Image (cartoon, helix red, strand yellow):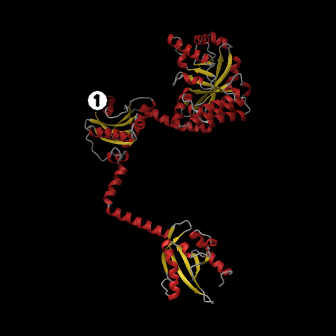
Amino acid sequence: MSQNGTLYQALLSAAADGIIIIDSKGVIATFSPAAEALFGYSADEVVGKNVAVLMPAETAQQHDHFIRRHMDTGHQSIIGQGREVIGRRKNGDLFEMHLSVGKAQHEQGEVSFVGICHDLTEYKKALHQLQTIDDCYQNAISEKDSVSDEVHFLKHFDVVTKLPNVNFLRQTFAQVDYQIDEHELSFIQFELVSFQRMRKLGSEHEVEENLRYIATALKKDPNVVDVSRIAQGRFLIIYRTPKQYVTKTLVSTYLGFIEQRLKGHSSVAPTWRAGCAIHCDGTTFNHTLTCSEMALTYAQKHSRSLVIYDVEIQRVCERAQILQRRLVNALAFGYIQVYMQPKIHLSQHKVSGFEALMRWHDDILGAVSPFEIIQTVQELGLETELDRYIITKTLNTMSENINLFSDDTPVSINISAKSFIRQDVIEHLIFGIRERELCSQMIEVEVTEDAVLSINDAVRTNAGLLREHRINVCLDDFGTGYSALSYLGKLPLDNLKIDRAFVNEIHTERGKVMLEAIISIAKSLSLTVTAEGVEDATQCAMLKGMGCDYAQGFLFSPAIPVTELRVFLSELSVEEAIAS
């Protein structure tokens, strides 16, 4: 078959294994496509060269000798047989392959050798993996008991404290006779509030030592019938308490004792909180565990060190769970409404703007306060979603009632600290204004102190973006958070809003001095001042006398639906309200 024939070339191209044909001097005459892929050379690079280029150095040096000996003696040791050899790729990598060699005698007397090369790399890898698996299996058989014990420990116990996990405690609880007699069992979920601070300020080794110390102290107490580490710095203690004692007093004293012992052992001052539930006859482990968790959750929300479960706590916790589900639903379907509270210019005795405030009346829960909404949103991490919702709702309300608003009566929209550092939220506001063809000066943004306390690049960028679009920025609830006068001059603020807590103290000498100081500072920075929570004419007159520019509160109007705004504006008499 001619080497230039179509059938010959088709066979070479179709072959999965590399085919190399050399002459009697070892010079490559043919190099198939599969050989190109195997060795990394193109045919043009190797045809006409000695086949030794495809071999490691030690083999290449002897190859020509082997060919000459065969040609001289006719020795057939490798002809027609396969064997494993080492090949050398173009990049220098060596690999194992299976080589079969055949011999062809041409009519003219010339001799050619045909080599068929099969890559053994993947085959060898598979063999190695099988061997590794077999070794592991043999080791597992020999160490079965040890491995079984370790698996059991890892499944049921905490590695650091060696305490059982809550699942193991649940399984064993019903099987153990605790012999409580005149006692009752208290499920205490004990939480180190300072755990994260310990992790940040101390080494991981120190934190683990503290956890082990707590575990040892708890296990040594004869009244602790069982204990489990259920999460990071949280433990479940099943504690035996005499029925004639007040549980709260006894548990509080006991946990205080643990805290004192830990103080001498930790470089970070430990603080704790706990939720406790009494295990009653006929109730399950899971029920009492859930009740103790409700008590701990209540302690977290209300900043208590210890809470004992009762039916009122269950009612509060169940309502909180319902509230979370209903709030997500309300945001999805637009059930939270935006009301407008007028802002009054104290010198001109007229409405000078509004604050958009959320109001929600749920079919199941009834009226839900803004405080509850914000608290629940923070628990769910939905601050940004709520801000986007209120921005959209407010802009839609303004667009649908465009004749009620103007750049002389701008609407303030509250934006959380988490959203104020996000450029996408600020751009959502700006795009929404542009999309509805509203004047940007019809909008103001209110942010709380924590939003600007850390003045980083994101805060500067977003504040600058609002200023660029002529949207005023108001600092809300000034003085109630982490007040720092330094940031007042570092951001492009326009208005400072005094919290109602200061307004309520205006009749005291201390309160009056505080208000005068705040207003004076604002004026020195060319900021206008708004007082919120103004409820009587005396407060209003005193604020005006101090130089306060604007006021809002029940003296003038609560937040009202936009459908009632037109009537309110037509009937409002600021002079009468102030005179009253």
| Quarter of the view holding residue 267 | top left
Q: For the point 56% across and 25% down, which residue is it?
A: 487
Residue 192: percent from the left, percent from the top? 38, 35
Amino acid bearing label 1: Tyr
**Residue on which disc 1 sits:** 245
Label count reads 1
| Quarter of the view holding residue 546 | top right
Secondary structure type for disc 1: loop
Q: Dot 1 surroundings within 10 Å: few (below 14), some, or many (20 or more)?
A: few
Q: Toward the viewer: 566 or 347?
A: 347
In the image, residue 167 sits, relative to residue 318, either above or below, namely below
In this view of the protein, can residue 335 be seen by the observer? no
- Looking at the rendered image, the quarter that the N terminus falls into is bottom right
Q: Toward the viewer: 422 or 406?
A: 422
In this view of the protein, can residue 215 be seen by the observer? yes
Q: Toward the viewer: 269 or 230?
A: 269
Q: Is 58 on the left-hand or right-hand side of 421?
A: left
Q: Toward the viewer: 46 or 510?
A: 46
| Quarter of the view holding residue 18 | bottom right
- Looking at the rendered image, the quarter that the C terminus falls into is top right
Q: For the point 60% across and 89% down, which residue is it?
A: 109
Residue 307: percent from the left, percent from the top? 39, 31
Residue 108: percent from the left, percent from the top? 63, 89
Residue 428: percent from the left, percent from the top? 65, 36
